[in-house]
Amino acid sequence: MKITSDFDSGNINCLDATDASNIQLEIKSDGKADFFQWFFYKVEGAGRAPLAMRLKNAYAASYIGGWKDYRAVASYDQENWFRVETSFDGREVVIRHTPEQEPVYYAYFAPYPTSRYRTYIGNVKAASLLTHEVIGKTLDGQEIDYFRAGEGPRQFWVIARQHPGETMGSWWMEGFLERLTDENDGAAQGMMEKTTLHIVPCMNLDGAKRGHLRTNAAGKDLNRAWRNATMEESPEVFLVREKMQETGVDFFLDVHGDEAIANNFLDSAKGIPAWEERHEKLFNRYSARLLDISKDFQTKEGYPSAAPGKANLDIANSYVGETWNCLSMTLEMPFKDANVNPDPVYGWSPARCRHFAREHLEVMAEIADIVR
């Protein structure tokens, strides 16, 4: 039996694979940072033996609450990802599965490697409704893609995957771009009449390729770099911020995943010094409309708001909301299955991310006239 992760977005250290019923594994940290929880690896040569794979360092992972009620995903073709039996005893995560084919892949969430990203972005570039620009390069020399759509007066910004292990952001972005580029979609066409959309589909390409959970090649958490971004440590944020200075921002959505909370939710910029009743009304309007049209959204669970004037301006949501005095939000999706509208086979999945994104576009189109 052979267990490997030496591929795009892979992460695991195999300690012992001599016994299929007691495979010993460790998750690698983010290179120059101590974050770890993302894993993605391949098992070959196991036949149809029942596997028990123990993540020995799970107790020290970055977000212990993420293991509660969590189930890993598995796939034979890296397209169809399904949930498998997983347990956590306070020290080890144990993944149990009897594969029906070889090889078989296991991951923290359905992976979205940079190879898939480049193929998909190549197709997006061919869409006549979008203008593409490379706004710079990452520390590893990867091109940072920026897309513009529409010629409306309101400047809408949408970014995803500042944290590379939160691959649901890339699956969400696929659904968003698919609807946006549908010339027969009334909401998409209406939105492009009212807004100019600015889209960065993947902020942290280096971390994604390296198999990191949270940081880029320099070990920098991009979503803690917005106030003091530099080309030396966080060029991804620095370059996007420069582009925002050129365009202005009337609306901002930053797409993420949350390890512990088993539901989709929005986090506002409440707590920024500029926060006022207008922001509250816009956030509530967006949330209420999304709640109306999406069976996958809820508003009962989420992050607590910062105290007035105490928001962390290193975080994109707060920095953008304060700098441009606009409706600024973070979308969080679960690694686990969502408690609202659960799916016992697939859990929260790529297909559901894509569909959820389409619903967001509809709400954005509806509020475009009132964001200022």
Image (cartoon, rainbow, N blue to C red):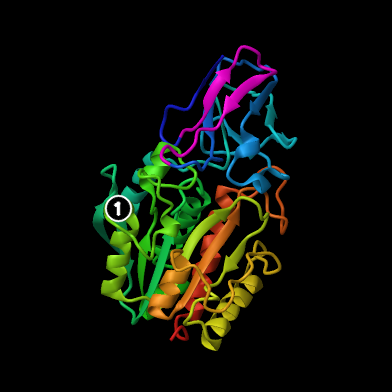
Secondary structure, mark 1, is strand
Is most of the magenta stretch helix, strand or loop?
Answer: loop
Residue 237, x across and y down, in percent: 34, 59
Residue 365 magenta? no
Residue found at the very far right of the displayed protein: 89
Picture residue at 43% right of the left edge, 77% below the top: 322
Q: Quick check: 209 left or right of 166? A: left
Residue 302, x across and y down, in percent: 65, 64
Nearest the viewer among 198 and 127 is: 198
Residue 236, x across and y down, in percent: 33, 55
Q: Quick check: 24 left or right of 38? A: right
| Callout 1 amino acid | Ile
Picture residue at 52% right of the left edge, 82% below the top: 279
Which portion, as a residue range, is magenta? 10-32
Nearest the viewer among 188 and 247 is: 247
Residue topped by disc 1: 144
Residue 19 magenta? yes
Picture residue at 32% right of the left edge, 66% below the top: 241
Quarter of the rendering occupied by the C terminus: bottom left
Visible residue check, residue 190 = no
Quarter of the rendering occupied by the N terminus: top right
Q: Quick check: 322 left or right of 131? A: right
- Quadrant in the rendering for residue 306: bottom right
Task: Reply above or below: 314 against 289.
Answer: above
Instruction: Judge the density around disc 1: few (<14), some (14-19), many (≥20) Cα neighbours within 10 Å.
Output: many
Visible residue check, residue 91 = yes
Picture residue at 68% right of the left edge, 49% below the top: 337
